[in-house]
Image (cartoon, rainbow, N blue to C red):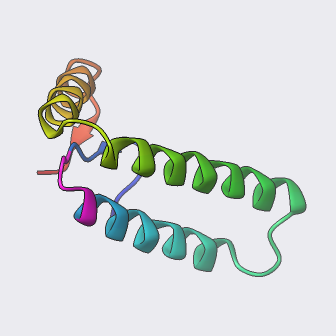
């Protein structure tokens, strides 16, 4: 199970997009149809930011994405967050 302490650092955009879609589906199903409007709005905001990020990343040099992913992985390890390989 993936929790809030987990981080995935990947540069394959198709894989990232597919995993995000899956993760949001899991979250929405877990929250159920009775989630509060505030939670629904917050989740929609995160979904929108992720969609924009995916579009920007698709136009970015892959080496820059890998560098950013590695930097985030290092930061997560330093902070003691679990990193999913």
Q: Residue at x 20, y 36 (%)?
A: 61
Q: Residue at x 18, y 47 (%)?
A: 11
Q: Nearer the viewer, residue 51 or 58?
A: 58
Which residue occupies the extreme right position in the image? 37
Q: Residue at x 71, y 79 (%)?
A: 32
* Quadrant in the rendering for residue 20: bottom left
* Quadrant in the rendering for residue 23: bottom left
**For the N terminus, which image quadrant?**
bottom left
Report the side of 7 relative to 32 (left or right).
Answer: left
Q: Is residue 12 magenta?
A: yes
Residue 10: x %, y % from top left: 19, 48
Residue 69 lies, with reference to residue 29, above or below; the image says above
Residue 36: x %, y % from top left: 86, 63
Residue 58: x %, y % from top left: 32, 49
* Quadrant in the rendering for residue 69: top left
Q: Residue at x 70, y 58 (%)?
A: 44
Q: Nearer the viewer, residue 69 or 28?
A: 69
Residue 21 lies, with reference to residue 74, above or below; the image says below
Report the side of 77 relative to 36 (left or right).
Answer: left
Q: Which residues are magenta?
A: 10-14
Main SS class of the magenta portion in the image: loop
Any part of residue 18 in sight: yes
Residue 10 lies, with reference to residue 18, above or below; the image says above
Q: Is residue 63 magenta?
A: no
Residue 52: x %, y % from top left: 53, 47
Any part of residue 4 in sight: no
């Amino acid at each position: 199970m993936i929790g809030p302490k987990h981080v995935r650092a990947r540069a394959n955009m198709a894989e990232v997009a597919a995993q995000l879609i899956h993760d949001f589906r899991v979250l929405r199903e877990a929250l159920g149809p009775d989630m509060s409007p505030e939670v629904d709005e917050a989740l929609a905001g995160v979904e929108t930011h992720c969609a924009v990020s995916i579009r920007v990343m698709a136009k970015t040099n892959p080496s820059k994405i890998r560098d950013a992913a590695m930097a985030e992985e290092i930061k997560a390890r330093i902070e003691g967050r679990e990193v999913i390989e």
